[in-house]
Amino acid sequence: MNERFQMDLPIPETKNRELEEYEGIAENVLGKALKELGGHYGDHEWYHARRPEIHPNSVRFIVGIDDMSRGGKLEEALRKYWHEIVPKVEAKVQEVGIGTRRGVQDTILYLEGVTVSFDGFKALNDLSFYVLEGELRALIGPNGAGKTTMMDVITGKTRPDTGKVFFKRSIDLTKFDETKIANMGIGRKFQKPTVFDNLSVFENLELALIGNRGVLDSLIFKLTGEQRDQIDDMMETIALTEHRDKLAGSLAHGQRQWLEIGMLRMQDPELLLVDEPVAGMSGAETEQTVQLLTKIAKTHAVVVVEHDMDFVYALNCRVTVLVEGTVLAEGSMDKVKNDERVIEAYLGR
Ligand SMILES: Nc1ncnc2c1ncn2[C@@H]1O[C@H](COP(=O)(O)OP(=O)(O)O)[C@@H](O)[C@H]1O
Ligand SMILES: [Mg+2]
């Protein structure tokens, strides 16, 4: 093989994770191209096919070749199969929720084929659900659809009978208990706030920040200037700066909810699960909550369960409709609210 055939083809904007996948895709394409020329992937009378090289934005095909006159045909075939297969791969990636307009991101949460039965009744039924890093996602569906059960599975409160539950691609959440999962970076806000009523707004946030030291230790513990700033920033974010010394027990309903979201956020979880945050809130409080969650979702993935459709609309994010323990529809609010099956099963006419 005296000659060296070399050709680069583009890989769509992607992260390292997908680049590995492109190795297999490139080999596949090379195999198809060589087959079209009457050979197969590997060595042949007239060529020696090297493993394709994966570069950050391209794949490089290198083939030792005895006679360059075949190069043109090889180039044509490679180009054809590459442009045929790559869009399909990307479409698949979109379909499972790995791609967004912002480019390809990592999945932070991955549930596949999850089933949970209670005395034979399937609260979750072959559920698949994917969330991206830094994504804001709304989860809606009728009572009993399995929304809370799904959160229980993610946080280790309930073990699935079958299915995969992965965090950050490699952490199998079914292997850990609630405390471990919380420490790994999954924060959960329950419907009922769990703030300390007889501590002030500042003290609640302080406790959340310094973690498990306990109330007594926190009296001795001295915050650094940086930690003070962090708490001040959070009070600003949750619109409670002017109430910093007020006892949590004397806050309005909406403010208590924000305080708890703030406390969760102080622990810096990579994924936040929020169950019905605006139940019982006034219109103005709901609006403020939209701002708060949108702001948090700039840096953290957030999954919000909510019944209030105006609120979900205002979140302006991808919506997953859960019905009878499985995903009925997914997409923008505009898309799902016009979906016949969603109207039938949930929204009504
Ligand atoms: N611990 C349990 N034991 C028995 N049934 C349960 C349990 N938890 C939930 N379920 C049932 O599973 C279904 C889904 O409940 P849930 O996840 O709370 O729905 P959602 O939060 O969407 O309203 C319901 O029919 C509920 O009665
Ligand atoms: Mg529920």
Image (tube, rainbow, N blue to C red):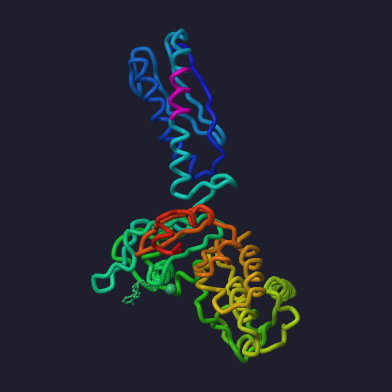
Q: Is residue 91 left or right of residue 133?
A: left
Is most of the magenta stretch helix, strand or loop? helix
In the picture, residue 176 is in which quadrant? bottom left
In this picture, is 194 found above or below 306? Answer: below
141 vs 173, nearest the viewer: 141
Q: Is residue 102 magenta?
A: no
Q: Quadrant for ligand 2?
A: bottom left
Badge count: 0
Where residue 288 appears, as percent x and y from the top left, is 66, 71
Where residue 114 appears, as percent x and y from the top left, is 34, 61
In the displayed image of the protein, which residue is found farthest to the left? 120
In this picture, is 17 found above or below 145? Answer: above
Q: Is residue 74 left or right of residue 302?
A: left
Q: Quadrant of the N terminus?
A: top left
Identify the residue at horizontal 51%, vertical 20% (top origin): 6
Identify the residue at horizontal 62%, vertical 92% (top origin): 198
43 vs 80, nearest the viewer: 80
Q: Is residue 161 among the parts visible in the rendering? A: yes
In the picture, residue 46 is in which quadrant? top left
Magenta segment boundaries in residue numbering: 76-84
Q: Is residue 209 among the parts visible in the rendering? A: no
Where residue 83 appears, as percent x and y from the top left, is 48, 28
Identify the residue at horizontal 46%, vertical 62% (top origin): 349
In this picture, is 326 found above or below 204? Answer: above
Q: Is residue 2 left or right of residue 36?
A: right
Q: Is residue 235 left or right of residue 213?
A: right
Where residue 301 appears, as percent x and y from the top left, is 55, 61
In the picture, residue 26 is in which quadrant? top left
277 vs 2, nearest the viewer: 277
In the displayed image of the protein, which residue is found farthest to the bottom? 198
